[in-house]
């Protein structure tokens, strides 16, 4: 069988740009059906592009922005849901921790004397020093400092005695049923030979009664208004 030779084109067909330009130049705008193919395709493509741009500008751009906003809201709601779910799962633990905090706070509050008990507490502090053989050169209560729900009473003390007795006195203070602290401690040789002199600020605390707390809240409420 004889194979027939297949001839391939040796060059691409030439585009007649002048003819295309003439097609556009001599188009009859009143008779689009008679336009040549290339002008028809070009005009249709241009119209399609204009429609797409108009749709993007007037419709799709706002919708895409709204879609992006909704996606962010959805992500935020998901995070809130997961957080609330985690809290719901641990609700019993939170209730238990809150009850423990209430018990701890109540125990601390019981260590604060009220106004009528503060004088007895000062006597206990003085007796703790005398019981260790210490000599009080100064025991001067200062001005109360009112806080949110308690008052702080500083007491300037100057005591003469031995270093060992000072340590025992500090231990006795720590064992008192009420909260008493020793602050700004300074120890130096006393005027009497063989003794030391301790200068400190002893602080004790008391809780405010309901009337005092009400007075504290009034200025805060006035400031907020």
Image: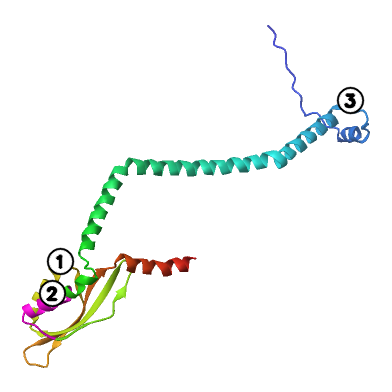
Q: Position of residue 158 (x, y in %)?
A: 16, 85
Location of mark 2 (residue): 124
Q: Is residue 115 magenta?
A: no
Q: Earlier in the sequence, mark 2 or mark 1?
A: 2
Q: Position of residue 105 (x, y in %)?
A: 25, 58
Q: Quadrant of residue 12?
A: top right
Q: Tell me where the magenta segment starts and ends, as one range.
A: 121-136
- Could you tell me if residue 148 is visible in this image? no
Q: Quadrant of residue 84?
A: top left
Q: Horizontally, is 70 left or right of 6 in the view?
A: left
Q: Main secondary structure of the magenta part?
A: helix
Q: Position of residue 221 (x, y in %)?
A: 44, 66
Q: Which mark is residue 93?
A: none
Q: Residue at horizontal 90%, vertical 32%?
A: 23
Q: Quadrant of residue 207?
A: bottom left
Q: Is residue 17 above or below residue 192?
A: above
Location of mark 3 (residue): 33
Location of mark 1 (residue): 177
Q: Horizontally, is 202 left or right of 25 in the view?
A: left
Give 57 or 164, whichever is nearer the viewer. 164
Distance from Cα at disc 2 to Cα at disc 1? 10 Å
């Amino acid at each position: 069988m004889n194979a027939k030779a297949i001839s391939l084109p040796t060059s691409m067909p030439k585009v007649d740009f002048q003819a295309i330009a003439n097609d556009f130049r001599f188009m009859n705008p009143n008779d689009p059906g008679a336009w040549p193919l290339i002008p028809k395709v070009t005009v249709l493509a241009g119209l399609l592009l204009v429609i797409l741009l108009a749709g993007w500008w007037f419709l799709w751009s706002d919708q895409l922005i709204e879609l992006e906003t909704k996606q962010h809201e959805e992500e935020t709601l998901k995070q809130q849901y997961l957080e609330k779910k985690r809290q719901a799962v641990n609700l019993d633990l939170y209730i238990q921790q809150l009850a423990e905090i209430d018990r701890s706070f109540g125990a601390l509050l019981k260590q604060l004397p009220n106004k009528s008990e503060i004088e007895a507490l000062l006597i206990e502090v003085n007796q703790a020093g005398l019981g260790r053989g210490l000599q009080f050169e100064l025991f001067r209560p200062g001005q109360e400092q009112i806080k949110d729900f308690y008052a702080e009473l500083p007491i300037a003390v100057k005591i003469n005695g031995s270093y060992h007795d000072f340590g025992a006195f500090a231990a006795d203070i720590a064992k008192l049923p009420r909260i008493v602290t020793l602050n700004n401690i300074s120890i130096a040789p006393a005027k009497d030979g063989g003794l030391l002199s301790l200068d400190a600020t002893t602080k004790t605390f008391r809780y405010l009664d309901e009337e005092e707390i009400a007075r504290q809240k009034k200025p805060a409420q006035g400031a907020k208004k």
